[in-house]
């Protein structure tokens, strides 16, 4: 027990816990990854030689709803962390489950959007828009899916009684990942959808 | 394992958790503030979509939307990710790569003639 407890609270020489420092370093590298994918999308924007074009397909009201869902999942995530820190296991389970469910709803929306695009003739290699759009939003969706799996594993740990206040750090690290995924979508929502006609 | 008090005490000998921004001791932001931030995020999103549909704002669409998007970005990173209250090292770990990524995006857009098209 004490061995695990020590690991749970292990600090680096910087005074920052290992896991937290690792997650922020990872997030820094993720900034570069998404930066490169956004670059690809922006430099090839408007260079498709054949349709369908983004203005023909992008559904702003629909994607606004899924964006709202993902934003609210970030709220649920911080409330889950707060509950774990307070030792409120019931609340922690509720908010962790809510975060995962909202993430799943977002993924469902993305699946619907992709299916609709393919149905309209926008395959992965149809034009420059489809190639860069699917790569960028698909990579983001994969991150959301990994986050949902991570949250589900935390929920399982909670039901097994292994997610008390002493484990708040692992929930905090999962939360950092989840919020970063949300932050990336904030950028993509503007760049891909709202600036589509610029 | 199930004794949180012992686990906590065994974890950071000689360390002041609060000073190091440890997860257990981050009561800087109340749940009420979190909810308020979420409401602000939802309102900003609604404003973004409204701006998108207002024809008269078309010439200013890019600066308005980028500003609103940056506001949401900063709110989530600052409050939900606690970076506003966390160590300067963590802020640097995030801001450094972010700045490089932004520079690459703008540089490549310039090289591809996006700004002159």
Image: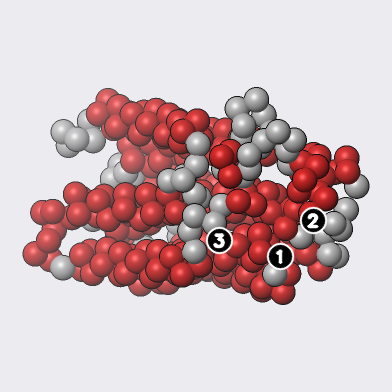
**Do the residues indicated by labels 1 and 2 lie within the same chain of the protein?**
no
- Distance from disc 2 to disc 3, alpha carbons, whole Å, reads 21 Å
Q: Which of the colour schemes (rainbow, by chain, secondary structure, one colour) is used?
A: secondary structure
Answer few, some or many: residues within 10 Å of disc 1's Cα (few below 14, many 20 plus, some between 14 and 19): some
Which of the marked residues, 1 or 3, is nearer the chain's N terminus? 3
Dot 2 lies on which element? helix
Against A143, residue A97 (above or below) is below
Q: Which residue is mark 3?
A: A78
Residue A186 screen position, x and y as percent: 40, 54
Q: Are marks 1 and 2 in contact (CB under 8 Å)?
A: yes
Against B48, residue A37 (above or below) is above
Against B54, residue A26 (above or below) is above
Residue located 77% across and 59% down the image: A163
Residue located 31% across and 49% down the image: B70
Residue A170 screen position, x and y as percent: 70, 49
**Do the residues indicated by labels 2 and 3 lie within the same chain of the protein?**
no
Residue B90 screen position, x and y as percent: 51, 35
Dot 1 lies on which element? loop
Q: Which residue is mark 2?
A: B4
Residue A60 screen position, x and y as percent: 34, 67
Foreground tag (2 vs 3): 2
Q: Which residue is mark 1?
A: A87
């Amino acid at each position: 027990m004490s061995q695990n407890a020590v690991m749970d609270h292990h600090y680096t020489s910087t005074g920052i816990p290992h896991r937290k420092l690792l997650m922020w370093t990872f997030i820094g590298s993720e900034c570069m990854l998404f930066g490169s994918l956004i670059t690809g999308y922006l430099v090839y924007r408007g260079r498709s030689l054949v349709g369908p074009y983004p203005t023909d397909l992008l559904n702003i009201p629909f994607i606004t709803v899924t964006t709202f869902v993902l934003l609210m999942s970030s709220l649920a995530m911080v409330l889950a962390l707060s509950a774990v820190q307070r030792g409120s296991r019931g609340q922690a389970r509720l908010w962790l489950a809510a975060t995962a469910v909202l993430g799943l709803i977002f993924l469902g929306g993305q699946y619907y959007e992709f299916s609709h695009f393919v149905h309209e003739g926008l395959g992965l290699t149809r034009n420059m828009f489809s190639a860069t759009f699917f790569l960028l939003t698909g990579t983001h969706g994969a991150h959301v899916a990994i986050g949902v799996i991570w949250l589900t594993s935390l929920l399982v740990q909670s039901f097994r009684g292994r997610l008390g206040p002493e484990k708040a750090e692992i929930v905090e690290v999962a939360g950092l990942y989840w919020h970063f995924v949300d932050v990336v979508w904030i950028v993509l929502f503007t760049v891909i959808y709202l600036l589509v006609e610029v | 394992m199930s004794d949180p008090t012992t686990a906590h005490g065994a974890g950071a000998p000689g360390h002041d958790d609060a000073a190091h921004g440890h997860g257990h001791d981050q009561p800087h932001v109340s749940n009420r503030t979190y909810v308020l931030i979420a409401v602000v995020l939802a309102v900003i999103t609604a404003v973004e979509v409204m701006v998108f549909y207002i024809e008269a704002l078309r010439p200013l669409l890019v600066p308005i939307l980028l500003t609103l998007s940056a506001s949401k970005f900063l709110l989530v990173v600052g409050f939900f990710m606690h970076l506003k209250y966390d160590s300067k090292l963590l802020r640097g770990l995030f801001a450094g790569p972010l700045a490089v990524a932004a520079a690459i995006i703008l540089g490549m857009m310039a090289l591809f003639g996006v700004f002159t098209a």
